[in-house]
Amino acid sequence: MSEHNSKHPSRPRKDPRNFLVTEGRHHRKRISRSQTAHDNAFDGSQKSSVKNEPQVKKVIVEQPDYYVVVVPDILDGALTRHDRDVIAVARSMVDDGYQDGQGAVLVVLFDEAETDLRALGADRVLYFTEPDHQGSSINTCAAVLNDLMGAENIACVLCPDSVGPAADIGRMLAAKRKTFVASGVCQVSGKKLRQRIANGRIEAERPIPDVMLLLEDVGELSSGCIYEARPYECQLSPEADNRVENLGNLSVDPNDIDITEAPFILSGGNGIADWQAFLDLGQNLGATIAGSRVVVDKGLIDRDRQVGASGKITSARCYIAMGISGAPQHMQGILDCEYVVAINTDAGCPMAERADLVVVGDASEIAQSLSDKITQQRGDHDDI
Ligand SMILES: Cc1cc2nc3c(=O)[nH]c(=O)nc-3n(C[C@H](O)[C@H](O)[C@H](O)COP(=O)(O)OP(=O)(O)OC[C@H]3O[C@@H](n4cnc5c(N)ncnc54)[C@H](O)[C@@H]3O)c2cc1C
């Protein structure tokens, strides 16, 4: 098993550990996860930084006149791609002078997130993630924001319009403030927004209200600056309001999730000789199983798990393609996937071209050795 780049020595390999931010539906822009330049930008050691390290402009806002607030969803301890899009919109509102005076982007975290918010455009971060507050109800989170709006000049609160908690918090906040919430927002320009209504068939233009729920891919991070993400100090102690209780996430069988919704997919193709090893790996990884049309036609998986033009379109955060060549009809089904891993004997196949990480080798052997590794690690963990 080896990571490939032999067939395309002139093309640099992509590093899947980097953050991805969409530029548009099918274009991606990478933001380095490396902290070096960012750290240097703030500790004053910029001049002595590593050779070829890009110079990063630092932005410090001492006393903002107003804030544009972002409430991210946070999934598995990190901001989602959608969350980052929303921060990018907040950033451009502030940079374009949404209100008179100096604005700042304030990100409010109701859950722990490991993501570095400085590169994403946050001037301030309010951490409402103390153990006392964990599992706070949607109502309590909305009450925090309501208090914040009473204490500061908050121009607008932005949330991703998704199935995550942030959209519910935004709607609850609007209800508390007896104000209008704009959902399905697909464009923000000046003091106006465009939103999709009537099941996306119509776009309407409106003034920006207190609370906006934004669709994915609306924002584009473009500044190349590094922001402070300074902890925001405030004394907020809203009354706990548990009329709507947060029961946390329910565990589900990954194979009960439709492949259009699944966040993590292990997909198999004609290159897999040992199908049982593939299925075992899916179970060990906790991934949703899918496949190419060839394996569906062979009767190895149900037709509703076929990815592609005549199957279903997935937008998984991680799509592992084992023994799949990457025919155009298949690729149409994975255009929106965030990270693609190709496992294939052919380092030059179209799937490898598309992938963020390519592992060259026999699919069945790799499936077996990954499963063995996971089982071994679980055993080690149980022994502790
Ligand atoms: C109208 C139309 C609609 C279609 N719709 C779809 C669709 O919705 N979805 C879809 O998937 N296809 C669709 N197809 C079929 C599509 O054109 C391809 O035939 C199909 O996607 C190929 O599937 P595959 O990659 O699994 O198989 P193959 O093309 O046979 O590729 C197998 C891959 O496995 C690799 N491999 C071989 N041995 C190993 C090994 N030991 N270990 C690891 N890798 C190995 C090979 O290098 C190769 O890349 C459609 C076709 C038509 C005409």
Image: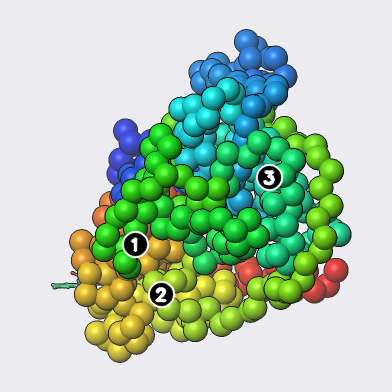
Name the residue beneath numbered marker 1.
197
Q: Which mark is residue 259?
A: 2
Work out how far the residue at label 3 is from the one at label 2, CA to CA, in angstroms: 40 Å
Determine whether label 2 and label 1 are within 8 Å by CB: no
Q: Secondary structure at mark 2?
A: loop
- Please report whichever mark, 3 or 2, sits nearer to the chain's N-terminal start: 3
In the figure, 16 relative to 334: above or below?
A: above
152 vs 196, nearest the viewer: 152
Q: Judge by depth and name the residue closer to the eye, 184 or 111.
A: 184
CA separation, marks 2 and 1?
26 Å
Rendered position, 21 above or below 365: above
Residue sitting at the far top: 47
Give percent across and percent down for residue 170: 58, 57
Q: Position of residue 190 (x, y in %)?
A: 41, 34
Circle 1: element type: strand
What residue is rendered at 52% in x and 67% in y?
A: 163
Labels 2 and 1: the sequence-earlier one: 1
